[in-house]
Amino acid sequence: MKNLLSQLFLIILFYLMALFSSPVLGQTLSQTVRGIVTDADSQAPLIGAIVTVLGSNPLKGTVTDQSGSFRLENVPTGRITLVLSFIGYEPKAIPEIVVNSGKEVLLQLSMQESAVNMAEIKVKPNQVKGQALNEMSLISSRSISPEETSRYAGGLGFNDPSQIVSNFAGVANNPNGNNDIIVRGNSPKYMQWRLEGVQITNPNHFADQGGIAGGISALNNNILASSDFSTGAFSPEYGDVLSGVYDVKLRSGNNEKVESVLGIGLLGTDLTVEGPFRKGYGGSFLLNYRYSTISLLTKAGITNVKGNPNFQDGAFKIVLPASKLGTFSLFGLGGNSHALLDEVNPDIAETPGDRSMLPGIREDIEIGSYLLNLGVNHTLSLGKNSYLQTTLAHSKEGIKDQVFESNVKKEYNDAGEYVGEVVTNKHTNYISRLFKSSYRGALTYHHKIDARNKIQVGSQYTLFDYDYGQSRLVEDAEARVSLIDFQETIGTLRNYISWKHRFNEAVTLVTGVHNMNVLYNKKSTLEPRLSLNWQLNTTNSFQVGYGKHSTMESPHNYFAKVKQEDGSFTEPNHNLDLLKAHHFVVGYEKRFSDVLVAKAEVYYQDLYNLPVENKTNSTFATINEGPDFNYVELVNAGTGNNYGIELTLERFFKNNFYYLLNGTIYNSTYKTLEGKERNTPYNGKYLVNVLFGKEFVKLGKHQNKTLGLNAKAFFGGGKNIIPLLRDEKGNVAVNPEQNQFWDYDKAYETSLGSLYRLTLSASYKWNRLKTTHEIYINLDNLTNAQGKLTEYYDSSKPGSVGHTTQIGFIPNLMYRLYF
């Protein structure tokens, strides 16, 4: 069946290529490059800025008009570098812009006003590749371009932004294949996703009941603009976050012509359409829709994949300029997924709470989830140096699952030989519904005082609406007990003020304060932030940063029903305080050239007010909580520490190749009321990434083809576990009468060994007169490495232990047509 599926997929690819391909006929392949240039601080358009194509002969250039717009016609396909210059502003270069014949290049560029007198300026284009787009983020932040997302090898999906960040120092993904983002040893539950400047749901399909993980991102690189990723000591605008911030931006659609991208891949089939509303109007639309390819083939009767996993998602951005009323922007991201997993094996389980890891137990799981994010942004100019941003947004996410549990009995023949298993007593053991909605309103004022000073003042109100319910059968499988059942709302109010001061072109300071208020239980914080970047000379810079940060816990912890000794239930956690942390970062950067840079960052994170179980012998802290919920009484008496050093050597793409090498040595620990310092589950001790890529350009008779090859090697420590109980001889010891299976005295002391993964990818692109074609293949975990992750009772061998392992070899093939 796999061979049939592959053959059918290839037939479809070649048919589409033949259908849409057209001969080159000897013409020079070119495309239009256009965009807008604005002031980096005030967002006001720059009139008269000079835009040129570096190295063009004859020189190709233009000047921005009254709206700050520029247009370059007949730019040859390939890669170009644009150079911006304007009186009173620092020159800037935008390198490695990809020009395809099938799609216009639309750019939104900005320039920084010079902080020194004109006589002191050296006119040399500034190429600070990888620098964060947010000028308030000076440390532990970087921008990620769509071109990088599509080029780097790794992950299950082509153009998956959830996977790209694991290529950077201090960041890891879950080796079981989920899209967890583990930053500097912190739990992935404290990762914050943002879209168009506002916090959103976890944007992954098949997310677990904690709203984390998920295997396939609903975000698609076809609709993304360059985005920022931060790993610590966040700028003052970011609140209710502890681990990392992925601030995703959607690009604007083409406001002059209709363009489309069709993609067919093993994971999903998608279509992107963009264009203007009418000729002469600056507004545009951008729409994307994707459906699971496997589900399509299953419905057509061509294949039959176990569990019939299916998903679909869509996204849009609509830009509506309104002259003096400002600019309105509507955006959205949504999706749903469903799967039915029969005869779940322990080797796909993750945590000790999963009963499929116990002897004699088999589970079938039906899971359905959805996500929805809708918003509107309004930007209003208040003069040459000020503007106001208003955002209204609504988010929903939910998961509903049922676990059908059966008892499994082994059967043996008269000779004592094992002949199989008998499944008995099947029942619905576990039912869960976890629905969460949020309503947000935000207002941000930006004011550029002068070339040296800018301030931001912002406020955001959020109302969370929860509908949570979970129940399971007690051990006699006759009575059902409610684990949690509540419909509640929690309101939060966040305020911040941020000030950027440039002492000169070498020294920049950003400072401010963030205020977080949980209105439900009247908890609040005042969080100072500070960062400094000192450009020692043209090649060396030094950064320092500090931030106090806090975050709410998952809602089920506030409303957990805890059984008392007399059999009654109470909800003792309503007054739970915020988890807090101090972040300290020191960084150094050495630029050997405009494309080769070495970085080092040392960080320390002091976690306090950590919610832990209110028992002196318990090892449970909320930072270790995974897919399974724990319903216990919590107190804010725990502590934790994350510290490490990150080293990076990066050669950005130029002259058709790049490489990225980074290594992290780190430690992540915590303490509960027992007073013992323990590893967190995410304390892998070290991470190493090695990436390399090469493009072969101007291939073929008409020199219109490009072959790209990329490779990634990852090495890292494994996830720490709670081991199974053993007796004095080291044999597995089971005490089902007391429901004891795991040795909590040795919780997270060690992992089951280090992990590695090798990934290769290749892309083949060719330009035609009005279309661009691309074939992409990604071979993840090429060596099929099976590093051990957790332990479980192996029912096929009484008394023995099995191991869950990292996800194996997964190929992905995709064809894209740009037209």
Image (cartoon, helix red, strand yellow):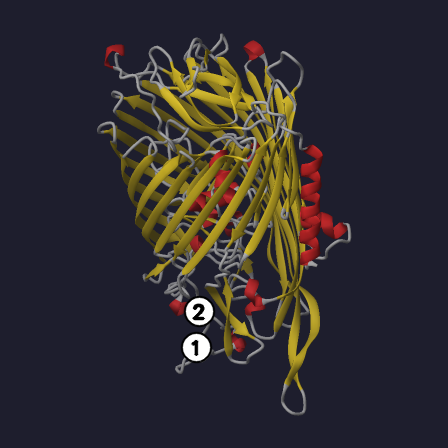
Q: Secondary structure at mark 1?
A: loop
Check whether the beta carbons of the residues at disc 1 and disc 2 lie within 8 A of each other. yes
Specify the amino acid type for callout 1.
Answer: Arg
Instruction: Find residue 464 and report its image quarter.
Output: top right
Residue 634 appears in the figure: no
Q: Give the mark count.
A: 2
Q: Position of residue 635 (x, y in %)?
A: 41, 53
Q: In the rendering, which numbered label is found on residue 726?
A: 1
In-image side of 688 versus 326 (left or right): left
Residue drawn at point x = 44 percent, y = 41 percent: 694
Q: Which image quadrant for residue 51?
A: top left
Please give the label number shown on residue 723.
2
Helix, strand or loop under label 2: loop
Asked if residue 786 lies left or right of residue 301, the reply is left
User: Between 804 and 748, which is closer to the camera in this rendering?
Assistant: 804
Name the foreground residue: 364 vs 612: 364
Across and down, in percent, residue 170 comes to 37, 47
Residue 718 position in % (x across, y down): 41, 60
Measured as percent of width and height from the top left, residue 163 is found at: 49, 45
Closer to us: 7 or 759? 7
